[in-house]
Amino acid sequence: MPASDAQLSRRRLAGMVRKESLQILRDPSSIAIAFVLPVVMLFLFGYGVSLDAKDVRIGFVIESPDSETSDIRAAFGQSDYFDPVVFHAIQAAEQALQQHDIDGIVWLQSDFSHRLHAGLGAPIGVIVNGVDANQGRITEGYILGAWQTWLTHYTERRGLPKAFPITLEQRVWFNPAVRSRDFLVPGLVAVIMTLIGALLTAMVVAREWERGTMEALLVTPIHIRELLMGKLIPYFILGMGGMLLTVAMAVWQFDVPLRGSFLVLLVASALFMLVSLAMGLLISIVAKNQFVAGQVAIIVTFLPAFILSGFIFDINSMPWAIQAITHIIPARYFVSILQTVFLAGNVWPVILPNAVALLLMAFFFLILVRRKASKRLE
């Protein structure tokens, strides 16, 4: 190979970037993937997916109505979490639970007020619908929390000693309102960037082969590195534009706080975008068919990012074999960075190891792309 061919030519690289940029402008599907797809996905997942329990229908079984039971029911009714429905017999409440008319039962038995006034302890019965185990645990926690709050206020109003010598004063860091949206939306940004990054480049080389223009490129003086860089640079800029749009929507549309540095977020996003684009380019080179490349990109990038990145499912709760697999999912590291930068700030012990992992992955996939491209194209 002549020495001049081994060196990058700015003129040839600029020509390749210009050619690919014009291709993007002529083909609106790339622009739609970069800007329309993130908006649609953010609205669908941002508003449609929620792990919060709101207006949970709770059956209140009050066997002997009095001022105390009414006070408890009113306390639950004032909460945004509950929508109380009163029953006078446990059998009726159980039937309503079986018919899914209510999601849980709070049972105040006939001697509740007597035991409360006599200081004998006043247990309440709690039954929750466990068909949806996650929802059941959340509902149970909310009920017990509301019950403890009411009991504390009751003893304070009457100057009674507290039932327990130790009181729990809990604080929730980084997400005081415990809004699941604040946790989900940053992870969703990573999933969206995975999809748009891989899809943007999964088509480019395959499209050249399908249209028969790859042979024309091969007979030009352009070097394979210039060809690859010329295809990556325009889509990198396009993908980063989509990333900025998703971050802006997360902050202004969904009110997710951005407590960390925007520069850190930008650098981490650039690393992750390089990984996603390189994966898409590798798929495109191997597949040589746009339809196949698109399908493969969704299967090997989007689905693992959705399930195994920690976006929704806790990685530490997975079996150890699955946890080991998550280490080869790039989105795992980016989700951790995004959730930290958005909610906690610049926590370097979390950000740096994950950024290094993304950097190594970017090198790995770019080297793999270079080797596969030279084998197929030269």
Image (cartoon, helix red, strand yellow):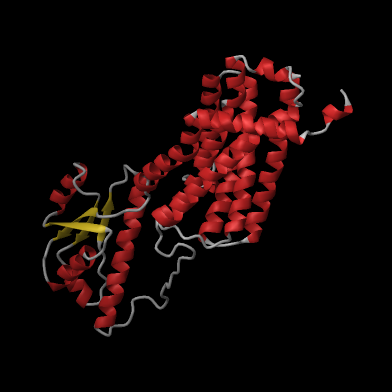
113 over 135 or under it: above or below: below
- Front residue of 64/303: it is 303
Query: Left or right: where does residue 200 sit relative to residue 349?
Result: left
Query: Left or right: where does residue 113 sit relative to residue 81?
Result: left
Q: Is residue 376 visible?
A: no
Q: Residue at x 83, y 33 (%)?
A: 7
* x, y percent for residue 251: 45, 56
Quarter holding residue 73: bottom left
Q: Residue furthest right?
A: 3
* x, y percent for residue 82: 24, 58
The count of marks equals 0
Query: Left or right: where does residue 17 sit relative to residue 119?
Result: right
Quarter holding residue 98: top left
Q: Residue at x 18, y 46 (%)?
A: 101
- Front residue of 16/292: it is 16
Q: Residue at x 65, y 28 (%)?
A: 282
Q: Residue furthest bottom?
A: 159
Q: Quadrant of the N terminus?
A: top right
Q: Residue at x 32, y 62 (%)?
A: 144
375 over 258 or under it: above or below: above
Quarter holding residue 19: top right
* x, y percent for residue 215: 68, 15
324 over 19 or under it: above or below: below
- Front residue of 64/336: it is 336
Q: Quadrant of the C terminus?
A: top right
Q: Is residue 339 visible?
A: yes
- Front residue of 325/291: it is 291
